[in-house]
Amino acid sequence: MIELENRIDLATEFQAMADHLLDAALAQGATAAELDIDKGTGLSVEVRMGQVDKLQYHRDQGINLTVYFGHRKGFASTGDFSPQALADTLDAACRIARYTSEDEFNGLADADQMASEFPKLDLYHPWELGADQAIDMALQAEAVAREHDKRIVNSEGAGVDSYAGMALYANTHGFMGIRHSTRHSLSCSVVAQDGDSMQRDYWYSVSRVPSLLDSADTVGAEAAQRTVRRLNAHSLSTREAPVLFVPQVARGLIGHLIGAISGSSQYRKASFLLNSLGQQVFPDFVQLREDPFIRQALGSRAYDSEGVASRVRDIVRDGVIEEYFLGSYSARKLGMQTTGSASGASNLLLMDTGLSFVDLLQKMGTGLMVTELIGNGVNSITGDYSRGAVGYWIENGMIVHPVEEVTIASNLKDMFKGIVGIGDDVDERGSIRTGSILIDKMTIAGQ
């Protein structure tokens, strides 16, 4: 791990390196330059069937340097921080810029967009985790899962990962920001069999704070329970019915929205939600907010990868698209302002409609609850949606039997408009936080 007492020295080293490279770039004739420097260290452990499969310590570091000669852009990177390697990297970036064609939209984000406030987001919590302790945790999770039910016959393994890093971004506007962060996780996946039926499932826990991870016993038991529940699944006859996406797959629906209203999709005219600002895309009860300032959250940040200040935004208000996700390049292409989204979306919060998971099952009555999606049959230009699905058939708000070998199909525009409920069972293990999403109808193709 990067030790706490070394972070000040490392930050000082990064700052000096950044100042030197940016000054050198200007001295070579660049009109502007930007760079990011990162360094991190971590530990990864994987076990399977009671044996250690992988034990890996990893350290990584790198510099990505971009220079601009007017509207010509050059990029080079290196993992070597020696003076000669830095000089070679700068020379390479400048050489590339001199020979590339001009693009009027190239350049740094505007200086007045740079972040000037840096709230304490509490993202750095290193884990004093030794290899033996990590192995014991993984073995414990797997053992609990394997011993949970005699039908658990095999294991795909359990793993523990821990990472701590520091990253600096700086540019010739005079902006410089340093970010310290950690990420830790524990996971387990097992296989169950009952006669001719064989199924696999998994569970995991992830957090920036080690003490907030679920215990090995909890992760192992949940992985086993989810796997056993899937045994003796069978297909359905083709039909049209309501579909309930549990939170782990519901976030994918929000991901498709983000892709559709991102700057690159908009200026390339490759989106099923082209020119959708101000359009009613969802029912009026749907609210989606971006909040980059949640303490300890996986998507929190004070600024994006161009140094642009983050801000709380309403992406969807009363079902209407209020804002896109734009970096400076895509914003200029569209004649708009950057939204501080050069590094993608931050913490996205889909507001619930006051319904619990049980309430949603009751509201659905009869339909398909989807717990896993297979394949990538989504057309981002037309919105056509067709994916393999695994889950449970519901009747009268109760689980009847597990389901496999079906395909669910619709169009994302119709799915968004067809949302009839959003649960309060929010999954916070990621940068998209949503509860279960109930859609009024989709085609379920089976036997």
Image: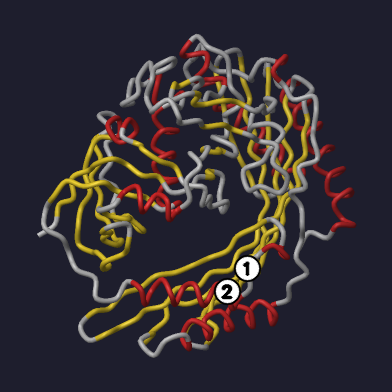
In this rendering, is residue 311 above or below 183? above
In this rendering, is residue 417 above or below 432? above
The residue sitting at 74% across, 22% down in the picture is: 172
Q: Secondary structure at mark 2?
A: helix
Q: Which residue is mark 1?
A: 214
Q: Is residue 117 left or right of residue 436?
A: right
Disc 1/disc 2 C-alpha distance (Å): 6 Å
Q: Which residue is mark 2?
A: 218
The residue sitting at 41% across, 53% down in the picture is: 246
Most foreground residue, 170 or 52: 52
The residue sitting at 19% across, 68% down in the picture is: 234
Most foreground residue, 374 or 3: 374
Image quarter hosting the C terminus: bottom left
In this rendering, is residue 138 above or below 41? below
Badge 1: how crowded within 10 Å, few (<14), some, or many (20+)?
A: some
Query: Where does the image place residue 74, in percent across and percent down from the top left?
Result: 57, 27
Which amino acid does the dot numbered 2 rest on? Answer: Thr
